[in-house]
Amino acid sequence: MQQLNSSNSSLTAPVSTENLIASSVMAVCFILGVPANIAVMVRLAGWLKGGSFTPRLMLSLAISDLLTLLSLPVWIWTLLHGWVFSLFLCKILSYLVYFGLYCSTLCVMLMSIQRYIQVLHPQEWKKLGRKGKKILVSGMWILSGVLSSYALVQRNLSKDSEGLLHCKRCYRNDVERVATLIWEIILFVILFLTLSYFYFQLYRGVNKSAFFSSNLMTRLVTRIVACFFILWVPIQISNIVLIIAVLLGNGSLLKSADSGDNIAIALTFINSCVNPFLYAFSARSLHQQTAGIENA
């Protein structure tokens, strides 16, 4: 009876504006992103027979995006009505979201490195061989799983001021909270510096390469990287504000940052939704160029 009363109260409890905005963004991402990523996976799967690396890498990106988006209905319900599932499901779903996001991040980073080497140093890229390319993709998935492991430890169930349960990160102390946020910011900075370096080096070499001038694949990857960066900046700003609030002991700032954090997190899901549409713009050129320039 107590659980029934709790469920009924969660359905009638008022929903904040921040949660309404975040849930709306997530709903759009789910409706558009899930079928789009499935369509991309089906199309790219037909291009893997030749063993080419770029479609394989983009297939990994589509899978990781889909993995991130599939749990959105649960998070939408949670934002509107609170968490009504078990602690086990809280930890597993959180881990899968982190896993998908980290894998997408590493895919984007690996794309920039691959394009730099393949366009400007094609002979070096060929030396990697089919086995080396498979190791790169497998290593990316394994590393994503390792980087996501802290979600299993930190995710827990806690009640808000209105008595509703939520699946959220729970820290033992402020030191752990600040350390986790700094770690996530450092990872983002490393990604940004890596992308900047390899694309700057690629830009310096484009005028010496007649091949690059007609390489629509590189422009496609550039769009993916640009969207990723723009959509991930808000969550990093939110992390910085949270760190400042914790260090200053400012409760009102911390509460405001926590409320806005849901919107910033929702924006990261847009990246998983946008990627398939970027593929669609250059799908035919992608297939033609990949078949002509890549040799597993």
Image: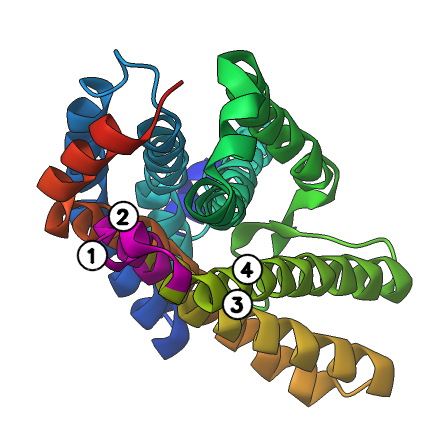
* SS type, badge 4: helix
Residue span colored magenta: 208-223
Residue 290: percent from left, percent from top? 25, 32
Q: Foreground: 17 or 98?
A: 98
Amino acid type, label 4? Leu
- Look at the numbered disc 2 and give the secondary structure of its residue: helix
Residue found at x 31% / y 71%: 21
> Is residue 196 positioned above or below 276 on the image?
below
Label 2 near label 4: C-beta < 8 Å? no
Tell which of 212 and 160 is nearer to you.
212
The residue that mark 3 highlights is 200
Query: Decide: marks 3, 2 in contact (CB < 8 A)?
Result: no
**Label 1 or label 4, whichever comes before in sequence order:** 1
Camera sees residue 144? yes
Callout 2 amino acid: Met
Give the Cα separation between the discs numbered 1 and 4: 29 Å
Is 154 placed left or right of 43 in the picture? Answer: right
Quarter the C terminus occupies: top left
How far separated are the C-alphas under marks 4 and 3?
8 Å
**Disc 4 marks which residue?**
195
Tell me the CA gap for discs 2 and 1. 27 Å
Location of mark 2 (residue): 217
Q: Is residue 7 left or right of residue 212?
A: right
Q: Residue at x 29, y 32 (%)?
A: 293
Q: List x then y, in percent, for residue 94.
A: 55, 39
Closer to the chain start, of discs 4 and 2, is 4
Q: Point out residue 289 in the picture as x, y percentages from the top left corner.
A: 21, 37
- In front: mark 1 or mark 4? 4
Crowding around mark 4 (Cα neighbors within 10 Å: few <14, some 14 to 19, many 20+) is: many
Q: Position of residue 261 (x, y in %)?
A: 53, 70
Q: Which residue is mark 1?
A: 28
